[in-house]
Image (spheres, rainbow, N blue to C red):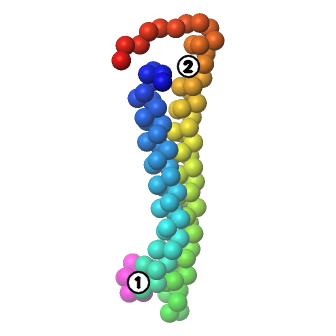
Amino acid sequence: MNKRYQGLRLVGLVLKIAGGLEMAFGVVSVVLIPLVLSGAQNALIQLGIPLNSPGSALWIGIAAGIAILFLGVVTGLLTFALGELINVVVDIELNTRGITGIETSVDA
């Protein structure tokens, strides 16, 4: 196995794991946020959000859950893509080095 750029490969792996976790939290939030906000009538009123009907906190929770789902998935995909980009750049460098015949010894 090639010992070059192990730090960058580790950073790429960490970013891919973080991106996956961000997407997972985004998906979980679509269920949890409406459940949390459905019983928060008094708290929303104290924050100054006018509630005209008894179920309006649930609708606010559903809208917030969908918004957080969208943001979580988008940021997770971007973070995952950045991790993949780092790995692609490292692979391009290693392929270029191999094609041009520039081989340097790396002491482990």
The one of 10 and 107 positioned closer to us in this rendering: 107
Mark toward the viewer: 2 or 1: 2
Looking at this view, name the residue that lies furthest to the right: 99
x%, y% of residue 50?
48, 84
User: Which numbered marker is on residue 23?
Assistant: none
Residue drawn at x 57%, y 49% as measured from the top left: 77
**Which label belongs to residue 94?**
2
Quadrant position of the C terminus in the picture? top left
Residue at (58% x, 61% y) in the render: 70
Tell me the distance, in whole angstroms, between the alpha carbons under discs 2 and 1: 56 Å
Residue drawn at the location 51% of the way across and 83% of the way down: 58
Residue 72: x and y, percent? 52, 58
Task: Say if 49 sits above or below 64 in the image.
Answer: below
Q: Three-letter amino acid code at disc 2?
A: Leu
The residue carrying mark 1 is 40
Tell me, yes or no, whether the highlighted magenta stretch contains residue 24: no
- SS of the residue under disc 1: loop
Lateral position of residue 99 relative to residue 7, left or right:
right
Count neighbours of disc 2 (C-alpha within 10 A) and say few if under 14, some if 14 to 19, many if 20 or more. some
29 relative to 83, above or below:
below
Residue 13 visible at all:
yes
Give residue 85's quadrant in the image.
top right
Q: Where residue 80 sits: x, y (%)?
A: 54, 45
The magenta-colored residue range is 40-50
**In this view, 70 is above or below 81:** below
The earlier-in-sequence mark between 2 and 1 is 1
Residue type marked 1: Ala
Residue at the image point whose x is 42% and y is 27% from the top: 6
Assign a secondary structure to mark 2.
helix
Q: Residue 105's image quarter? A: top left
As drawn, the residue found furthest toward the front would be 1
